[in-house]
């Protein structure tokens, strides 16, 4: 079997930097054979500038919203952003499909190898059938009115079956998940909970300051959102606890909880998540810092998460709420606001942590023999990344 050999200014193997004297060896199919000192690697080594790294994991994306790029003004706040997504997402199907293809090309070329993708329709299936990237398909259920819970669950289950059938992966890399605590009624929670078993379950968590207010006191801007959408909110009873503490126990059947945004997560929330059922499910905290900047000009509590040794992963959110679908761009923004964070740590968030969050660590996320994680070449100044395998 023929091999390919790569040497650069440094190699990041998924957990640590190895230095410039090491050579990455892969088989021609992209699977990892070994990492050895240059003195043992033989000839025909491809010399490269920059850093070699396993392919990135985009743990949170809405590929189906790619056609909305630039369509929603920046910094409108979450309520007006959500309202515009709901009311303005309907475009000609041909335009949507082309935008999905273009967005996947952007991710592929930028070094992303796997995506945790939110699905509210079947429009991304044709692109996913090309198998260029690995996808974990989060089939999103939402419905704040208790009366619509049965219809909304039926719709989510039908979509789950459609993805499983089309991608010939029954029950693999797909989950029925709640959209957000403020958009899933108690009835709908009870309907979808059995489908969490042993899965990764994604949920938008504490994305705005008034999310906690809604659960603590029943007040805040979400009431305006329900008025805009003509949704009767009189059934809501404040839980007197934060948003996360109001729902997290409902995720217990899941193996992994992927908490997305966490922009206003506090110490008590982290403590609560760790106290539930011996920390089952395992909590992964997904940062989408550019989307936080785009929607509300806010910054997630990165240092709080780090101080608590939380498992952090990275996502891009959608092109409706971001300027690009680039993990490197997410890391650049984090480094701008938190320059003390070592690049080695950021790369762990972007690779092995993300792979574990999606349950794909057996094949992705690190340079280990037999895996096919992809190979990315990051420029020496960390300003860009290019997929080479």
Image (tube, rainbow, N blue to C red):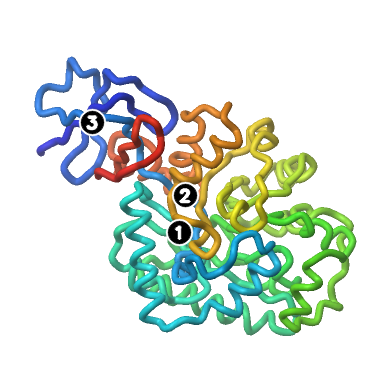
Residue 66 is drawn in which quadrant? Answer: bottom left
Tell me where residue 91 appears, x and y as whole percent.
Answer: 46, 81
Q: Secondary structure at mark 1?
A: strand
Front tag of 1 and 3: 3
Q: Does the image show residue 189?
A: no
Tell me where residue 48 appears, x and y as whole percent.
Answer: 23, 31
Q: Residue at x 45, y 59 (%)?
A: 136
Between 279 and 330, the one nearer to me in the picture: 330
Residue 202 is drawn in which quadrant? Answer: bottom right
Q: CA distance from mark 2 to mark 3?
A: 31 Å
Q: Earlier in the sequence, mark 1 or mark 2?
A: 1
Between 337 and 248, the one nearer to me in the picture: 337
Q: What label sits on residue 48 in the rendered view?
A: 3
Front tag of 1 and 2: 1
Tell me where residue 22 appears, x and y as whole percent.
Answer: 27, 21
Q: Residue at x 70, y 42 (%)?
A: 278
Is 381 left or right of 69, judged from the image as shown?
left
Q: Which residue is mark 1?
A: 136
Q: Residues within 10 Å of mark 3 (few under 14, many from 20)?
A: some
Front tag of 2 and 3: 3
Q: Secondary structure at mark 2?
A: loop
Between 197 and 101, the one nearer to me in the picture: 101
Is 223 left or right of 197, judged from the image as shown?
right
Q: Is residue 147 above or below residue 30?
A: below
Q: Which residue is mark 2?
A: 359
């Amino acid at each position: 079997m023929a091999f390919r050999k790569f040497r650069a200014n440094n190699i990041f193997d998924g957990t640590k930097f190895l230095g410039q004297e090491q050579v990455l060896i892969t088989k021609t199919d992209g699977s990892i054979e070994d990492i050895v000192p240059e003195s043992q690697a033989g000839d025909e080594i491809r010399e490269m500038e920059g850093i070699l790294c396993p392919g990135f994991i985009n743990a949170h994306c809405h590929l189906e919203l790619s056609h909305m790029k630039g369509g929603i003004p920046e910094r409108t706040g979450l309520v007006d952003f959500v309202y515009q997504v709901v009311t303005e997402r309907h475009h000609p199907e041909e335009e949507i499909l082309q935008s999905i293809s273009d967005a996947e090309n952007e991710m592929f070329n930028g070094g992303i190898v796997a995506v945790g993708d939110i699905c509210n329709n079947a429009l991304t299936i044709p692109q996913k059938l090309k198998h260029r990237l690995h996808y974990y398909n989060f089939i999103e259920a939402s419905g704040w009115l208790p009366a619509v819970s049965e219809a909304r669950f039926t719709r989510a289950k039908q979509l789950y079956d459609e993805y499983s059938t089309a991608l010939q992966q029954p029950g693999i890399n797909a989950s029925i998940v709640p959209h957000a605590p403020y958009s899933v009624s108690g009835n709908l929670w009870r309907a979808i909970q059995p489908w969490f078993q042993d899965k990764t379950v994604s949920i938008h968590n504490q994305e705005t300051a008034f999310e906690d207010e809604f659960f603590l006191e029943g007040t805040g801007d979400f009431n305006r959102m329900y008025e805009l959408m003509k949704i009767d909110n009189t059934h809501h009873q404040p839980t007197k606890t934060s948003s996360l503490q109001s729902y997290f126990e409902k995720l217990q059947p899941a193996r992994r909880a992927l908490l997305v945004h966490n922009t206003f997560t506090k110490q008590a929330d982290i403590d609560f998540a760790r106290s539930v059922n011996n920390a089952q499910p395992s909590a992964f905290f997904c940062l989408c810092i550019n989307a936080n900047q785009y929607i509300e000009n806010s910054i997630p509590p990165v240092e709080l998460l780090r101080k608590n040794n939380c498992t952090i992963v990275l996502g891009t959110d959608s092109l409706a709420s971001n300027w690009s679908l680039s993990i490197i761009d997410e890391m650049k923004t984090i480094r701008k606001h938190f320059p003390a964070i070592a690049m080695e740590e950021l790369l762990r968030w972007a690779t092995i942590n993300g792979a574990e969050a999606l349950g794909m660590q057996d094949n992705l996320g690190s340079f280990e023999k037999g895996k096919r994680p992809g190979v990315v070449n990051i420029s020496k100044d960390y300003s860009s990344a290019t997929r080479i395998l």
